[in-house]
Image: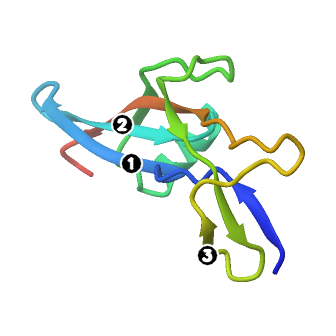
Amino acid sequence: MATDVMFPNARPSLTVEHTGGKQLGNCYSATFYRVTSTTRVSKKSLEALNHAGVLGFGQGFCVKSPCDGKEAPAGHDTLTAAEVDRETRTVVSATPVNRYTGKPYEPIQSPYYVYLCEATCDSGD
């Protein structure tokens, strides 16, 4: 049986959370979203999510947090190694040993990024 060592992450690759909203004036409202990703997300990709209706709808959309490809991670997840069967991808060992050093694999830190977005809409939409 051929195996691979992986560092599985329980965090989804991308999540979108509705975090609230408010009235901006007589006819305008804003809706707020938090997008969390295991990789950096470009402003263009966030705008595409808005255009698809995933991040609200209306006349306006903006990203309220850094989104220039240089943003720092919002945090890190600690990932532990697992040995998995190459064909079935099932876990064979939760504590694999490096075949070259004979030592268990050390946990690694995996970054995640958070983007705060705002969609604005007037009452006509």
Q: Which element is circle 1 on?
A: strand
Mark 2 or mark 1: name the one nearer the start of the chain. 1
In this view, the residue in front, 122 or 51, is 51
Three-letter amino acid code at the position of disc 3: Thr
In this view, the residue in front, 64 or 84, is 84
Q: Position of residue 12 (x, y in %)?
A: 48, 53
Q: Which element is circle 2 on?
A: strand
The residue at the point 45 percent across, 39 percent down is 36
Give the image quarter of residue 103: top right
* Contact between labelled residues 1 and 2, with CB atoms less than 8 Å apart: yes
Three-letter amino acid code at the position of disc 1: Val
The residue at the point 46 percent across, 49 percent down is 11
Q: Which residue is mark 3?
A: 90
Mark 3 or mark 1: name the one nearer the start of the chain. 1
In this view, the residue in front, 102 or 124, is 102
Q: Which residue is mark 1?
A: 16
Q: How is the image coloured?
A: rainbow
Side of 93 where 21 appears, left or right: left
Q: Position of residue 10 (x, y in %)?
A: 47, 53
Side of 89 where 13 appears, left or right: left
